[in-house]
Image: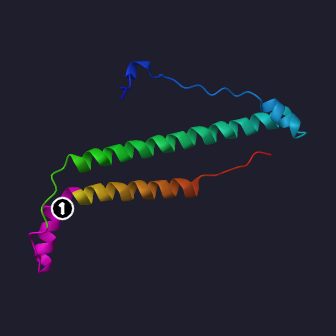
Amino acid sequence: METLDLQKLPKHVAIIMDGNGRWAQQRQKHRVEGHRAGIHAVRDTVETAAQEIAALVLALLIGVTVTATEWPETAERIWTDTEAVAVALFSDFVLPFEVVSVLLLAAVIGGVFIAKRERKEPG
Protein backbone atom coordinates (compact mmCIF):
# COMPACT_ATOMS: atom_id res chain seq x y z
CA MET A 1 0.00 0.00 0.00
CA GLU A 2 1.27 3.44 -0.90
CA THR A 3 1.79 6.06 1.77
CA LEU A 4 0.36 9.54 1.46
CA ASP A 5 3.01 12.20 0.89
CA LEU A 6 1.71 15.17 2.88
CA GLN A 7 4.17 17.49 1.12
CA LYS A 8 2.35 16.91 -2.17
CA LEU A 9 -1.09 17.84 -0.87
CA PRO A 10 -2.42 21.21 -2.02
CA LYS A 11 -2.35 24.03 0.50
CA HIS A 12 -5.23 25.90 -1.10
CA VAL A 13 -8.38 25.12 -3.04
CA ALA A 14 -9.86 27.49 -5.62
CA ILE A 15 -13.45 27.67 -6.77
CA ILE A 16 -13.72 29.23 -10.21
CA MET A 17 -17.08 30.84 -10.78
CA ASP A 18 -17.54 30.41 -14.51
CA GLY A 19 -20.79 30.10 -16.38
CA ASN A 20 -23.03 32.27 -14.22
CA GLY A 21 -23.92 34.53 -17.13
CA ARG A 22 -24.67 31.56 -19.40
CA TRP A 23 -26.80 30.00 -16.65
CA ALA A 24 -28.89 33.19 -16.44
CA GLN A 25 -29.10 33.55 -20.22
CA GLN A 26 -30.42 29.99 -20.61
CA ARG A 27 -33.18 30.86 -18.17
CA GLN A 28 -33.96 34.25 -19.78
CA LYS A 29 -32.70 36.12 -16.71
CA HIS A 30 -30.33 39.04 -16.27
CA ARG A 31 -26.64 38.21 -15.81
CA VAL A 32 -26.76 39.60 -12.26
CA GLU A 33 -29.21 36.82 -11.34
CA GLY A 34 -26.67 34.30 -12.61
CA HIS A 35 -24.00 35.80 -10.38
CA ARG A 36 -26.35 35.70 -7.39
CA ALA A 37 -27.07 32.04 -8.10
CA GLY A 38 -23.31 31.41 -8.35
CA ILE A 39 -22.75 33.01 -4.96
CA HIS A 40 -25.40 30.74 -3.42
CA ALA A 41 -23.81 27.68 -5.06
CA VAL A 42 -20.34 28.58 -3.74
CA ARG A 43 -21.72 29.29 -0.26
CA ASP A 44 -23.50 25.91 -0.20
CA THR A 45 -20.35 24.15 -1.42
CA VAL A 46 -18.11 25.77 1.21
CA GLU A 47 -20.63 25.18 4.03
CA THR A 48 -21.02 21.52 3.08
CA ALA A 49 -17.25 21.05 2.90
CA ALA A 50 -16.81 22.72 6.31
CA GLN A 51 -19.47 20.47 7.84
CA GLU A 52 -17.88 17.35 6.37
CA ILE A 53 -14.43 18.37 7.60
CA ALA A 54 -15.78 19.17 11.08
CA ALA A 55 -17.54 15.79 11.24
CA LEU A 56 -14.36 14.01 10.14
CA VAL A 57 -12.22 15.81 12.73
CA LEU A 58 -14.76 15.07 15.47
CA ALA A 59 -14.86 11.39 14.47
CA LEU A 60 -11.06 11.21 14.49
CA LEU A 61 -10.86 12.84 17.93
CA ILE A 62 -13.44 10.46 19.34
CA GLY A 63 -11.72 7.48 17.72
CA VAL A 64 -8.36 8.45 19.19
CA THR A 65 -9.94 9.03 22.62
CA VAL A 66 -11.78 5.72 22.60
CA THR A 67 -8.82 3.65 21.41
CA ALA A 68 -6.27 5.34 23.68
CA THR A 69 -8.35 4.90 26.84
CA GLU A 70 -8.17 2.02 29.25
CA TRP A 71 -11.81 1.26 29.93
CA PRO A 72 -12.83 -0.17 33.32
CA GLU A 73 -13.74 -3.82 33.70
CA THR A 74 -17.45 -3.89 34.51
CA ALA A 75 -18.36 -7.55 34.14
CA GLU A 76 -16.86 -8.42 37.53
CA ARG A 77 -18.99 -5.97 39.51
CA ILE A 78 -22.66 -6.03 40.36
CA TRP A 79 -24.02 -2.85 41.87
CA THR A 80 -26.92 -3.20 44.24
CA ASP A 81 -27.42 0.30 45.58
CA THR A 82 -27.63 3.83 44.21
CA GLU A 83 -24.55 5.07 46.05
CA ALA A 84 -22.35 2.37 44.51
CA VAL A 85 -23.66 3.24 41.04
CA ALA A 86 -22.99 6.95 41.63
CA VAL A 87 -19.45 6.27 42.85
CA ALA A 88 -18.75 4.09 39.80
CA LEU A 89 -20.18 6.66 37.40
CA PHE A 90 -18.11 9.50 38.84
CA SER A 91 -14.90 7.51 39.16
CA ASP A 92 -14.59 4.69 36.61
CA PHE A 93 -16.85 6.12 33.91
CA VAL A 94 -15.95 9.82 33.85
CA LEU A 95 -14.19 9.64 30.47
CA PRO A 96 -17.01 7.78 28.69
CA PHE A 97 -19.48 10.36 29.96
CA GLU A 98 -17.23 13.18 28.76
CA VAL A 99 -17.01 11.59 25.30
CA VAL A 100 -20.78 11.22 25.14
CA SER A 101 -21.28 14.80 26.35
CA VAL A 102 -19.05 16.12 23.56
CA LEU A 103 -21.04 14.09 21.02
CA LEU A 104 -24.33 15.42 22.38
CA LEU A 105 -23.03 18.99 22.39
CA ALA A 106 -21.90 18.63 18.76
CA ALA A 107 -25.32 17.22 17.85
CA VAL A 108 -27.15 20.09 19.56
CA ILE A 109 -24.94 22.72 17.92
CA GLY A 110 -25.40 21.03 14.54
CA GLY A 111 -29.18 20.93 15.06
CA VAL A 112 -29.29 24.62 15.95
CA PHE A 113 -27.09 25.47 12.98
CA ILE A 114 -29.35 23.56 10.59
CA ALA A 115 -32.52 25.01 12.12
CA LYS A 116 -31.26 28.61 11.97
CA ARG A 117 -29.70 28.39 8.53
CA GLU A 118 -31.57 30.43 5.98
CA ARG A 119 -31.75 28.82 2.58
CA LYS A 120 -32.66 31.14 -0.23
CA GLU A 121 -33.08 29.47 -3.56
CA PRO A 122 -31.75 31.37 -6.57
CA GLY A 123 -34.25 32.75 -8.98
107 or 76, nearer to the observer: 76
* Residues drawn in magenta: 75-95
Q: Quadrant of residue 3?
A: top left
Mark 1: give few (<14), some (14-19) or many (20+) Cα within 10 Å: some
Figure check: 35 above or below 89: above
In terms of secondary structure, where does tag 1 sit? loop
The residue depicted at 9 percent of the width and 71 percent of the height is 77
- Residue lying farthest bottom? 80
In the drawing, does residue 83 fall left or right of residue 20? left
- Residue lying farthest top? 7
The residue indicated by pointer 1 is 93
The residue depicted at 18 percent of the width and 50 percent of the height is 69
- Residue lying farthest left? 76
Q: Position of residue 119 (x, y in %)?
A: 66, 51
In the drawing, does residue 25 fall left or right of residue 89? right
Q: How many marks do you count on the picture?
A: 1
Amino acid found under the numbered disc labelled 1: Phe
- Residue lying farthest right? 28
The residue depicted at 45 percent of the width and 22 percent of the height is 9
Q: Position of residue 39 (x, y in %)?
A: 69, 36
Q: Is residue 88 magenta?
A: yes
Q: Is residue 43 magenta?
A: no
Q: Quadrant of residue 28?
A: top right
Q: Position of residue 70 (x, y in %)?
A: 15, 52
Q: Where's the N terminus, which quadrant?
A: top left
Question: What kind of colouring is applied to the model shown?
Answer: rainbow
Q: Position of residue 84 (x, y in %)?
A: 10, 74
The residue depicted at 28 percent of the width and 55 percent of the height is 99
Figure check: 122 above or below 116: above
In the drawing, does residue 77 fall left or right of residue 35? left
